[in-house]
Amino acid sequence: MLKIKFENLLVILVLTLIVGYDTLMTTMLNRTIPNIPVILLICFSLLLCFRFLYIKKFTFFYILTSILLLATSSVVFMSTGGTNFLLYSLLILLLYDADIDVILKTYVIVSGAIVLGVFVLSILGVIPNLQFAQVRSAGLVIRNSFGFIYPTDFASHCFYLFIAWGYILRKRLIVLRTLVGLSLSFFIIKFCDARLNALSVLLATVIFILMYVTKERKFKIYGILPYSAAIFSFIMFYLTYFFTWSSPLFVSLNNLFSMRLFLGKNAIDTYDIHLFGTTGVKFIGYGGTTESVYSYNYVDSSYIQMLFYYGVVPVVLLVLIYVIASKRIYKQGMFLFLALLSLITVNCTIEAFWVRPGYNIFMFTLFASLLPNQYKTKDRIELS
């Protein structure tokens, strides 16, 4: 008879709802799905607290982080009225010492089933496949959303699902993973024209091959990977904050980043940046319709967007947590996992999904991988 640990069952139940709901809300089905108040999702996530009855040790870093994240989330709520940061913080904290593979498998099954189902429904014409025409240097291209609110949303789901699936199979099926990666990268660039995500899938494929061939042997260059979040968030903030049309270099980088530097700078000039979030921020972008948007001001970069939604303090805190957690992962020799975390930080300089459970589930596994082996307990309750 199938046996499952009680705490794993809690993880599966909570992630199924939160990941599934977050993924569905990025599809064209979002208008027919009842909105679930964030406060209810927060209450549901608190079921994970029961896992703590069977965890005997907590690291000092975890305890300190819990205090800082919860305190910061409370201040963000009082400043802006937003509760998303509290939900995401709780999910990060309450997955402490959870089985990484259980988290990733749940994500892949739930989000993967939704993405595949929506894709098929869009091909059959049951739900709209929004198509956007865009002029590139090579000519006019058609970008397909395949049932999602925008082509890059579909492409981002594909990227995160691929790296999660690839990590689950990290010790086997390298040929299959390589073929899937190459095919998926080609598909994304051909039918979605999502260049960043196509490149990200390709780089992930290379990482999987490298780690498989070297058996995750340690190289000195890996020592810089834990600092990737700090490096790329600082670079993106610097380029955005000091962007000017008078500099040919900034203009070239702005073109390379598809106007993201200008849009970020415009948002900073319009709303200002505060320590704990900015009220009244309204980003308008494409998605959910093919109608023209004349007041487009959407800030795509995760690091810049979060400065407005959550504020400077939460963003800096998340970056520091990411760096310290990554350093511990480095010391544990989990170089494949570390490389994927670093790749995500690069992707998020342009994409807005660094802290979204329906996309980047890896953000919520940071503490799941940190508990030292000598602290792990074997006396977990099993259900059969």
Image: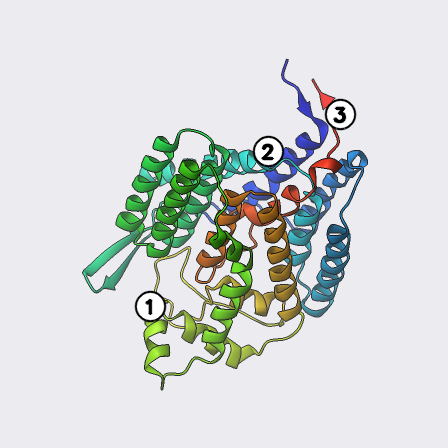
Between the residue at mark 1 and the residue at mark 2, the CA separation in whole angstroms equals: 38 Å
Residue shown at 67% from the left, 52% from the top: 87
The residue under label 3 is 381
Please state which amino acid type lies under the numbered disc 1: Leu
Mark earlier in primary sequence (1, 2): 2
Between the residue at mark 2 and the residue at mark 3, the CA separation in whole angstroms equals: 16 Å
Q: Is residue 174 left or right of residue 339?
A: left
Residue 75 visible in the current orientation = yes
Q: Is label 3 in a helix, a strand or a loop?
A: loop
- Binning the other alpha carbons within 10 Å of mark 3 as few (below 14), some (14 to 19) or many (20 upward) gives few
Asked if the residues shown at circle 2 and circle 3 are in contact, with their CB atoms under 8 angstroms apart, the answer is no
Q: Position of residue 153 (x, y in %)?
A: 42, 52
Residue lying furthest bottom in this view? 246
Q: Is residue 100 left or right of residue 65?
A: left
Mark earlier in primary sequence (2, 3): 2
Between the residue at mark 1 and the residue at mark 3, the CA separation in whole angstroms equals: 53 Å
Q: Is residue 122 left or right of residue 380?
A: left
> As rendered, which of 45 and 285 lies closer to the eye?
45
Label number found at residue 102: 2
Q: Quadrant of the C terminus?
A: top right
Label number found at residue 107: none
Q: Position of residue 96 (x, y in %)?
A: 70, 43
> As rendered, which of 109 and 201 lies closer to the eye?
201
Label number found at residue 256: 1
Please state which amino acid type lies under the numbered disc 2: Val
Residue shown at 70% from the left, 48% from the top: 93
Q: Is label 2 in a helix, a strand or a loop?
A: helix
Residue shown at 41% from the left, 69% from the top: 260
Q: Position of residue 173 (x, y in %)?
A: 40, 29
Please state which amino acid type lies under the numbered disc 3: Ile
Residue lying furthest left in this view? 139
Residue 124 visible in the current orientation = no
